[in-house]
Amino acid sequence: MKLYHISLNSLLRRKARMFFLLAGLLIAVSTVVLLMSIGQTMNEDIANKLDEYGANILIVPRSDELSLSYGGMAVSGVSFDVTPLLQDDVAKIREIKNRDNIKIVSPKLLNVADVQQKKVMVVGVHFNEEITLKKWWSIIGDVPEKEDEALIGVDVKRKLQLGLGQIVLINGTPFRVSGILNESGSQDDQLVFIDLERAQRLFNKGSEISLIEVAALCYDCPIEDIVAQASDKLPGARVTAIQQTIKSKMKSIHQFERFSLGISVVILFVAILIVFTTMSASVNERKKEIGIFRAMGYRQSHIIRIILQEAFLLSTLAGLAGYFLGVSVSGYAGSWIGADQVNVHIDSTIMALSLLISVVIGLGASFYPAIKAARLDPTVSLQSL
Amino acid sequence: MSLIQVMKLVKTYHSGGETVRAVDGVSLGIEIGEFVAITGTSGSGKSTLLTMLGGLNEPASGRISVDEIDIYRLSVEQRADFRKEYIGFVFQAFHLLPYLNVLENVMIPLAISRLSAAAKKEKAMLLLEKVGLHDKALRLPNELSGGEQERVAIARALVNDPPIILADEPTGNLDSATSGIVMELFSRLNKEGQTVVMVTHDEQNLSYATRQINLKDGRLSGGCRVAAV
Ligand SMILES: Nc1ncnc2c1ncn2[C@@H]1O[C@H](COP(=O)(O)OP(=O)(O)O)[C@@H](O)[C@H]1O
Ligand SMILES: [Mg+2]
């Protein structure tokens, strides 16, 4: 028989009280695990959906003048004489160090043209890239496949009274409207999209490009790095990271993480109180027993060990059980917070962390009661009986 | 020199602004192999003296040395080691732990020793045999009669082979027939050389003792009677 034998037996004996302590710690640990898992799921979810948020880097020719604006960004050099971007520059972006993070490169040529006697901005794009970039686009009809087909924004359709399949003259050249872009609320509604190479020929621009939109899927590396790398490759261009929905989404995740941290601190504090009161009450209940141990020659340190061992056993149990409870509950919580895919997996780091939290609280909050127990006057404890 | 040497021992308690001199200047010596009965009316200081002898209760002044160790000069932890080494306590209320079986209760003092598990068990079984309870080793205390529980407590007090047994009214909760059995056990142990100091107010028990010390208001009173053996 050893001291842990005494601890274990005494725990089994005082099931009701210890259940209270166990439940308190377990609920605390599982809630913290739940909050951590939700935060993690949200992060993973956003990482998975990164490509749905469109371009996050804009490359335009370098210029001091501001002329046109696209997507809220000033685009210079569209109608002024600056060194334009060329088709070759598009390939260079694929050569940067973080090239694996570059998901989509979509070059564009912007030009104001006469469309049915009205001035409309015509954009030359590579349609296959553009539609992957703009996942939110909803198109009535078809994406242009032939060079003489055009996709028009809903505002253009209204203003020019156009319909699907109709022929429209752009600077005198006929194009067939193969698709109409549904209301997107963006500038795209006022644009006419045609094939990039066709646009270059139509406007006599050679291999010129007005701007390049890039979608870099970099969840944990700073977008600024990619911007810097692209700037190095394209010294004549201005490379900018653009604000977009993902940032606000990230911000709300950070807010959630701060919120969970606050809640966790409160919960863990309550857990400390529960352990402390339970352990103190338990020590009070066991005064006589502690007196017996002391009379039998147990040192104060032995008493402390007995009590801390009990706390250790309970908090280990609570840490493990709390982890698994938290993980299983987070499986349900994931869909509740609107994450598409919830990966309920055993994460050894979180498991170790919840064990650690539980044991630190269990031992920490039992320390003072254990010392109090060790310092009890054994004669007083034994006297009354 | 005596095994236990008590010099001018004083213990005071303060309660409600009053100071009680529970033990008031006691000096005495106890030799190896004695069976000392401490008698006196309730509140005369018997229990206080006994716990002080066992290194469990610090005196206000005076000195106790056991085996020439001045025990209240030891640190708290050293004094715990002293108790483990020298003292076996037996209480009136048995004080067995309800969640441990009889064998485990006897092994409590061994839980902090370095003996092997097998040696601990063997030792405890040996003592259970000595008190005639080896067949009840796996019972829980509440399944035993009062006399049996007291015998378990005696086995527990002996398991570390302490030179001194201190018993505080060990028969106080027992009927006279059972008391007789328990006293026979103490007497037998004493005849085997065990030093016993026992607080009792039961006249019946005095016949087993080799010496009686009577306390009155914390002081020794009357002569010391040595039992005719
Ligand atoms: N812890 C204590 N606090 C206050 N007074 C005490 C304490 N222990 C004993 N006393 C007092 O000391 C005196 C002696 O008590 P005790 O040694 O228990 O006597 P006995 O064992 O002979 O009945 C009594 O008056 C008792 O009230
Ligand atoms: Mg008493």
Image: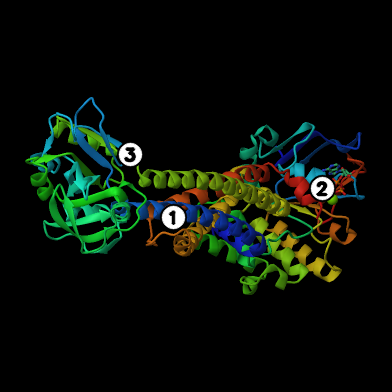
Of A113 and B167, which appears nearest the observer? Answer: A113
Label 3 to label 2, Cα distance in Å? Answer: 92 Å
Q: Nearer the viewer, mark 2 or mark 1?
A: 1
Considering the numbered disc 2 on the image, is that residue within a helix, a strand or a loop?
helix
Q: Are marks 1 and 3 in contact (CB under 8 Å)?
A: no
Q: Chain of mark 2?
A: B
**Residue at image x 76%, y 71%?**
B145
Q: Quadrant of ligand 1?
A: top right
The C terminus of chain A: image quadrant: bottom right
Instruction: Out of B56 and A97, give the one closest to the viewer.
Output: A97
Does the closest atom of ligand 2 sit within 8 Å of the Cβ of label 2?
yes
| SS class, disc 3 | loop
Compared to residue A131, the image places residue A299 above or below, namely: above
Q: Amino acid at mark 1?
A: Ser
Q: Which residue is mark 2?
A: B47
Vertical arrangement, residue B148 with respect to residue B162, above or below: below
Give coordinates of residue A175: x percent, y percent: 15, 56
Viewer-nearest of labels 1 and 3? Answer: 3
Q: Amino acid at mark 2?
A: Ser
Q: Are marks 2 and 1 in contact (CB under 8 Å)?
A: no
Badge 3 local density, few (<14 within 10 Å), some, or many (20+)? few
Residue that label 1 marks: A37
Q: Nearer the viewer, residue A30 or A9?
A: A30
Q: Residue furthest bottom?
A: B135
Residue A110 relative to residue A182: left or right: left
Which residue corresponds to the image point at 90% horizontal and 47% vertical from the top-left? B43
List x then y, in percent, for residue B8. 82, 32
Q: Residue at horizontal 24%, vertical 63%?
A: A164
Residue indicated by mark 3: A72
Image quadrant in which you'd find residue A27 = bottom right
Please state, as top left, top right, bottom left or bottom right, where the N terminus of chain A lies in the image. Answer: bottom right
